[in-house]
Image (cartoon, rainbow, N blue to C red):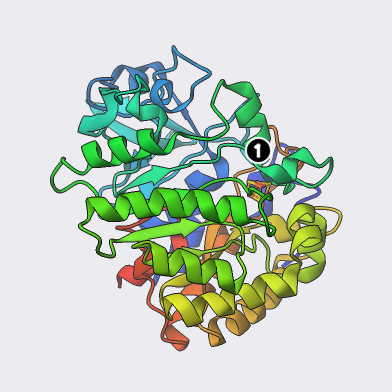
Amino acid sequence: MKNKLLDIGGNWREGELSLRQVMKKYPEVSPFVIIKADVQRRGVEYTERALAMVDPDIHLTKVRSDYSNKEDLTPVSLMLRDGTSICTSVDVGGNTSSGRDPYLVDAVDGVSVLIDEDEVIEEVSYWEKPDYHSKTTSRGTPMWHVVSPRPQRLCIHPHQHCDFWKTPGHGCKFCAMSAVYHAGNKPELLDVGDILETVNEALREPGRNVSIFLTGGTLCGGENFLDDEVDYYVDILAGITKLFGGRRFPSQLISTAFSKRQLRRLHDNTGLTSYTADLEVLDKAMFDWICPGKAANIGYERWKERLYQAVEIFGKGNVNTGVVVGVELATPGGFKSEDAALESILAEADELSSNGVGVVGCVWHVAPGSVFRKQVSPSLEYYIRVAGGFDSIRRKHGISVDMDNYRRCGNHPDTDLGRI
Ligand code: SF4
């Protein structure tokens, strides 16, 4: 396939298969997954009618998840009829649609729907707010500042900045974390007591959460490199473990790639059940270009080695790595065609999985505030081919997708394919 990225312009639809064409060409892929991938790629806008359907007492709105905008009642995100989540991004500093116009969320006959080119694509519902959301901790911190919910789980982001951004040129080029951090008034580190109180409160709501998820920016410091990050996560996870009577509990940590000694500490001192360290892109040269902080401090091959060591400690099926699918086609350092990119990243995913590490993909939503803010993401068809490839590779190597499936995470089109 010819790379259409450079001449996408205003008539981008002429250069790639449409949603309907992709659905027709890939009948083995759920149409809900294809819709999800395209909405995550292109983003959404809400009409006044769609916003009028929002009930702030019921629905999660951006006023509750973005410290910087107190008036915005835009829904945090969307759900499809079959339970497929669509994790739409919070854009800071302007809207973006990866070079293409976004989907519209509108209301037709009292039902919220996705619209594209005046066609109703599918019904959607808005994510609902959990019970703990309007409560405060004993320190007076609003609990929504501490734990952000998905429909499936509790998400905790204890370190809300990233040390890589503190060295000029070291932040990952697709990442908007620094822009988001500086646009709001978030504390850099959450208080551990606030986290434990909030999790304890959130767990009172029956039937809502199937896992607890932690992630945050890198903390480089400590006696050994990354010890501060490990210490912080051990404190939090050990505290949550006590809430579960000292037992292991369904949980996932996405962190920097820790050393074997650090991983052992994390495993043996907490009830954590699954571990992720994101390579972000499956190619050493592109890792060096796109993730310079990770490359300078750990390096691509050592990152992989640490993932393999994590499998020894947490077990196969409990370790994976996330990639931002599409950044491997960024210009000028990326692959020149989608075919070349696909062949290369699937070969690398196969090698990782032959060593017990699952590979999961996020759809690259070009983020304002990132170095890559002017880039254009690949075609929808590319995302569906990658999703099918990752799913097949996991099946070939017998790697369970449960730690990151639609019920525990909901962000990855490829793990949605594991439902069948
Ligand atoms: S490690 Fe990279 S992707 Fe993760 S927060 Fe830091 S800069 Fe962003």
* x and y percentages locating residue 286 in the rendered image: 78, 63
| Relative side of 131 to 29, left or right | left
Q: Is residue 52 visible?
A: yes
* x and y percentages locating residue 384 in the rendered image: 52, 64
Task: Name the residue at 28% across, 20% down.
Answer: 56
Task: Name the residue at 56% across, 42% down.
Answer: 42
> Which quadrant: the N terminus?
bottom right
Residue lying at the far top in this picture: please name it. 71
Given residues 369 and 391, the one toward you in this image is 369
Given residues 80 and 249, the one toward you in this image is 249
Q: Is residue 340 visible?
A: no
| Relative side of 226 to 22, left or right | right
The residue type indicated by label 1 comes to: Ala
Task: Name the residue at 36% across, 66% down.
Answer: 273
Task: Name the residue at 59% across, 35% down.
Answer: 101
Quadrant position of residue 341: bottom right
Q: Residues within 10 Å of mark 1 (few under 14, many from 20)?
A: many
